Amino acid sequence: MHLVNKLSSSGSSRPFPVPSREPSSVEKIVEIDEHIGCAMSGLIADACTLVEHARVETQNHRFSYGEPMTVESTTQALCDLALRFGEGDEESMANTDFLLNNCASRLWFPLVCCGLRKGMGVSRPFGVSLLIAGHDENGPSLYYMDPSGTFWQCGAKAIGSGSEGADSSLQEQYGKDLTLQETETIPLSILKQVMEEKVTPNNVDIAKVSPNYHLYSPSEAEAVIARL
């Protein structure tokens, strides 16, 4: 499960702490661009394909326009890819599905994305939900994208297994005037309530965008956990 709590106060940093409960070596919280982070829940191969696509889009935007891509435009680019389900001829869709299911290395993912960007259809819906948090010219923002390619902006959101109850608690405690420490401890306190195991730096990741993406080190995460 992933919880994102957005800080929106009079401060200038406005970070987005992102705790994750999966004690896995697979990254569930990643950087898209220096000002955008992403948390995922679902099929990791699909998530990696979408993340690499977003990275290509943000870098192309920087190269073409000399400025960072907005968080909303980045999210829209991801949704556009997800909505290509069913497009293209049968051969191109079969080739795409083969690549998506047989990528043994991250080096393959840009190739998949490049093929999709050139008009190849997606043979099946992406089985992943994403939370995209970032800081751009419009300030901090958080977007949720479901597997269908639909997205909307939110202030705080939980995704993944057991997220219904956690999301309800998060919505009750979320406010625009939260401090940085509160945006760190509120999601972790909710995780502590719903997790079967003890919350430790080994099973919780925290990241923020304030305004640049930063993944907390184990010692930084331990300091936050110690405040619970």
Image: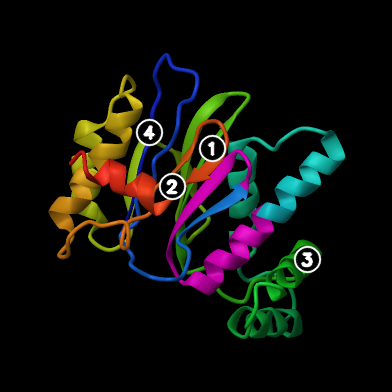
Tag 4 residue: 155
Amino acid type at circle 4 is: Gly
Residue found at x 46% / y 70%? 26
Task: Report the amino acid beneath label 3.
Answer: Cys
Q: Residue at x 61, y 53 (%)?
A: 78
Q: Amino acid at mark 2?
A: Tyr
Q: Is residue 9 left or right of residue 116?
A: left
Q: Is residue 94 left or right of residue 23?
A: right
Q: Secondary structure at mark 3?
A: helix
* CA gap, disc 2 and disc 3: 31 Å
Residue located at (26% from left, 55% from top): 163
- Mark 2 vs mark 3: give the one in front: 2
Q: Nearer the viewer, mark 2 or mark 1?
A: 2
Residue 41 spot, x, y in % from top left: 41, 62
Disc 1, SS: strand
> Contact (CB < 8 A) between labels 1 and 3?
no
Q: CA distance from mark 2 to mark 1?
A: 16 Å
N-terminal of the two: label 2 or label 3?
A: 3
Q: Mark 3 — residue?
A: 114
Q: Work out whether mark 2 precedes mark 4 in sequence or the reverse, and give the earlier one.
A: 4
**Mark 3 crowdedness (10 Å alpha carbons): few <14, some 14-19, many ≥20:** some
- Quarter the N terminus occupies: bottom left
Specify whether residue 42 is painted magenta.
yes
Q: Does residue 158 sit above or below 101 in this rendering?
A: above
Segment tinted magenta in the rendering: 33-54
Q: Residues within 10 Å of mark 2 (few under 14, many from 20)?
A: some
Which amino acid, by three-letter code, is at mark 1? Gly
Question: Would you call the spot at circle 4 few (<14 residues within 10 Å), some (14-19), or many (20 or more)?
Answer: some
Disc ID at residue 216? 2
List x then y, in percent, for residue 67. 77, 32
Quadrant placement of the C terminus: top left
